[in-house]
Amino acid sequence: MPSPFLTPGSIAQANDVALLHLRRDQTIPTILRATDSEHDGYKEGKVSNTRFGSFPHSTLINQPWGSQIVASKVDTGSRGRKPSNKRKAEELEASATTTGAEDDGSSAKKPEAAASGFLHLTYPTPESWTLSLPHRTQVVYTPDYSYILHRLRARAGATVIEAGAGSGSFTHAAVRAVFNGYPNEESATKKRRLGKVCSFEFHEQRAGRVKEEISEHGLDGLVEVTHRDVYEDGFLLGDPKTGRSPKASAIFLDLPAPWLALKHLVRKPASGIESPLDPSSTAYLCTFSPCLEQVERTVRLMRELGWLDISMVEVNHNRIDVKRERIGLDCEGVRGATVFPKSVDEALSKLLTDDERAKRLRQAHLEGTRVNPSSREDTTREPKDQSTPTYNLGRLVHRTESEIKTHTSYLVFAILPRDWSEEDEQKCRQKWPSDK
Ligand code: SAM
């Protein structure tokens, strides 16, 4: 099954994962189901209930991605359908649901909102998935993972080791980075190396849930999830001692104690088991740790184990909010008109002396009108400024957004060169004989 994360095509198909985009900061992930087997096979399929109305999946399936979909006239949210099994219940809880098959939590509280709105049907991307996925742990956000994947040289055909998988946020970004553009079966015939993410997670339920999501998202074969304590058992696939090597060239460790896993990431493991690293490539490593003590321990061990080019980066991603600021002293008058001064000087010139203010308040009291005693403006007239061009309405100022969705951590990068043997040296000399 092609994954809508990698090759969405132009039309939303049944069983695709889709993101129902309600507004800038609210998106609901859902799997499009033509019939709702969990709820007696309703013919309109599964129904997503949102604050903007109910959306039977029959109105979403076979629509072009990006379509604006109008809410159903039928109030499908009021049936009070309940999730019928535990997993479904957890899923609903994770996406802040309260009633119905899928719900953004508002339709039960605001039944009048049903059938009043619309949404946009969008295909998933790692970025939008990161913002809408059910959080089971802290996750790595886009500003960090885009930089990490770039530094790890995660490119088409590469193999990435990741631990722990957590909520699968990094997993989705990594698989897109290494996808070689061909469905699994075609990779072999086209002789393209199949890019792969080998993901390890020691929490059993989390590992199980990531596995299910990978399957639901059509990413089987490209992501292999292993339930494993990597500190103890390392990174081989299958059996920890005799299993296959993933032959990874990139490793990302988002673990509480990454230094405990480093002993397994060597060219020649002491116990004689196979190395999980690709022998023909440099290995690129990144660890993600929230505090400097963890960084120090990691760096110390990296040095002992021969990792080179060690560096630390903190990605400090700020969204900057740019707006025109009109400096205070609004002059609210009897008709509610508000006139803003254009500069600080103008604002100051409008301030009245204490005497003038007192006189004005007395007058207003006698006339029974509302005035702003601080303003020199004649508040009973319409503002003169209605035709003022926007650029003249105030100075442009910028502020950083107060709530930034990024898990601040220190990223430690290092590389481990490939082993170089006498045989490699000879091969090299044959290829470039003039090199001394
Ligand atoms: N990178 C993930 C994401 O973007 O969604 C989040 C990872 S979360 C912060 C850390 C995960 O590491 C947790 O799910 C935890 O269960 C897992 N973990 C901790 N120690 C582990 C170990 N020894 N082996 C494997 N996984 C481990």
Image (spheres, rainbow, N blue to C red):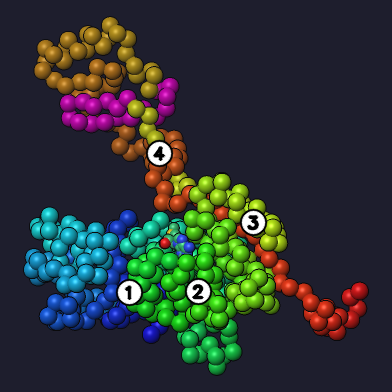
| Side of 318 where 421 appears, left or right | right
Quarter location, residue 412: bottom right
| Residue found at x 60% / y 63% | 262
Q: Nearer the viewer, mark 2 or mark 1?
A: 2
| Quarter of image, ligand 1 | bottom left
Residue at the top extreme? 355
Query: Residue 358: where, in percent of width, then height?
Result: 23, 9
| Quadrant including the N terminus | bottom left
Quarter location, residue 369: top left
Q: CA distance from mark 2 to mark 3?
A: 23 Å
What residue does disc 1 label? 17
| Quadrant including the C terminus | bottom right
| Side of 7 where 58 appears, left or right | left
Q: CA distance from mark 1 to mark 4?
A: 40 Å
Q: Look at the numbered disc 2 and give the secondary structure of its residue.
A: strand
**Tag 4 or tag 3, which sits nearer the N-term?**
3
| Residue found at x 61% / y 49% | 296
Mark 2 Cβ and ligand 1 under 8 Å apart: no
Residue 117 shows up from this direction:
no
Task: Specify the amino acid type for callout 4.
Answer: Arg
Q: Bounds of the magenta span?
A: 329-346
